[in-house]
Image (tube, rainbow, N blue to C red):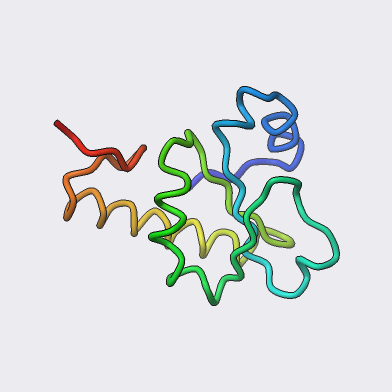
Amino acid sequence: LVYIQPSTLASLLSDPESAAKTAVIDVRDSDHVGGHIRGSTWVPLPQLDARIPELLRQNRDKDRVVFHCMLSQQRGPTAALSQIHTWYRFQVKGSRTASTGRAVG
């Protein structure tokens, strides 16, 4: 699990090439209404488990997936760990690569 600074994410998203390879998942609840990162996908943390298969399909070509919450102390890290575990299960059960979700062989 890697933490990145807001300035690092801003740099990634300001470059069109790296932005195309970066997915931002906003796991905040109602505080999302107050503003959000342009292009991010809003998935409140209580909905995350049910939407993981959808997120895997949508982001299979991304080099990095960033989970964002208000302070990145609870919801963001929890979501990232959940995603890592799901990718691992997907890799083992489906003979897929952990980094891309694409079939191996």
In front: 77, or 25? 25
The percent position of residue 11, horizontal first and vertical second, equals 73, 29
Residue 6: quadrant of the picture: top right
Q: Residue at x 72, y 60 (%)?
A: 71
The percent position of residue 90, horizontal first and vertical second, equals 26, 54
**Is 56 rendered above or below residue 32?**
above
In the image: residue 102, left or right of residue 43? left
The percent position of residue 1, horizontal first and vertical second, equals 47, 48
Q: Residue at x 78, y 55 (%)?
A: 36
Residue 102: quadrant of the picture: top left
Q: Residue at x 61, y 48 (%)?
A: 24
**Is 41 rendered above or below residue 74?**
above
Farthest-out residue, left: 105
Q: Residue at x 66, y 50 (%)?
A: 40
- In the rendered picture of this protein, how many numbered marks are placed on residues? 0
In front: 63, or 70? 63
In the image: residue 94, left or right of residue 54? left
Farthest-out residue, right: 34
